Image (tube, rainbow, N blue to C red):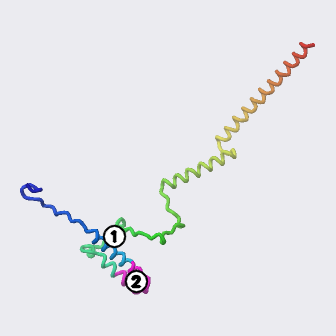
Amino acid sequence: MPRGGKKGHKGRGKQFSNPEEIDRQMRAQREMEENGDAEHESLSESEEESSSEDEHSQRRNGVEGLIEIENPNRISQKSKKASEVDVEAPKELSRREREEIEKQKAKERYMKLHLEGKTEQARADLARLAIIKKQREEAAKKREELRKEKEAQEAKSKR
């Protein structure tokens, strides 16, 4: 029984492109682009306007020539050559990248202020450190006094 049942298969048969045909079309397209670039450079401004209108009308096929479409999402992506790419131009950052950079800068600013002792946390830390230093000094004094007392007692006991 044939593919589509009793009535037969309705779809078209698959047509495969010949690799040589594809290569030939690509070469022709490259030659047109190269010739177009060479002609484009040599044309004057008036010829440039008329040729751009001719190219614009040639590009439209079928109904496209009748209907004007202004869809911003339908911009054709033009590939750039390596020599045309401007590496030194400022790169647009994404929102996440901008936020990450701002976050890092804010952290650096906070750390700088913290080291200078200008933040609330730094003031609290410095106050705590001052209290600990006093306690340690007092403990050291007590130990010194106790040591002196022991030495004095040992000296008395030896006599």
Vertical placement of 159 versus 102: above or below? above
Q: Which residue is mark 2?
A: 39
Tell me if residue 86 comes above or below residue 37 in the rendering. above
- Residue, far front: 20
Look at the picture and state if 73 lies above or below 50.
Answer: above
Three-letter code, disc 2:
Glu
**Magenta-span inclusion, residue 45:** yes
Point out the image quarter for the C terminus.
Answer: top right
Main secondary structure found in the magenta portion = helix
Badge 2 local density, few (<14 within 10 Å), some, or many (20+)? few
Pair 1/2: label in front? 2
Task: Check disc 1 and report the residue beneath it.
Answer: 70
Residue 110 point in image, percent of width and height: 62, 47
Quarter of the rendering containing residue 37: bottom left
Residue 149 magenta: no
Image point 61% across, 49% down: which residue? 108
Residue 90 higher or lower than 97, as above or below = below
Amino acid at the residue labelled 1: Glu
Determine the residue positioned at 86% across, 19% down: 151
Quadrant holding the N terminus: bottom left
Q: CA distance from mark 1 to mark 2?
A: 28 Å
Q: Quick check: 119 left or right of 42?
A: right
Q: Quadrant of residue 65?
A: bottom left
Is residue 104 shown left or right of residue 122? left
Question: SS for tag 2?
Answer: helix
Measured as percent of width and height from the top left, residue 94 is found at 48, 57
Farthest residue, direction right? 159
Q: Which residues are the magenta region?
A: 34-53
- Disc number placed over residue 124 in the picture, else none: none
Q: Position of residue 109 (x, y in %)?
A: 62, 50
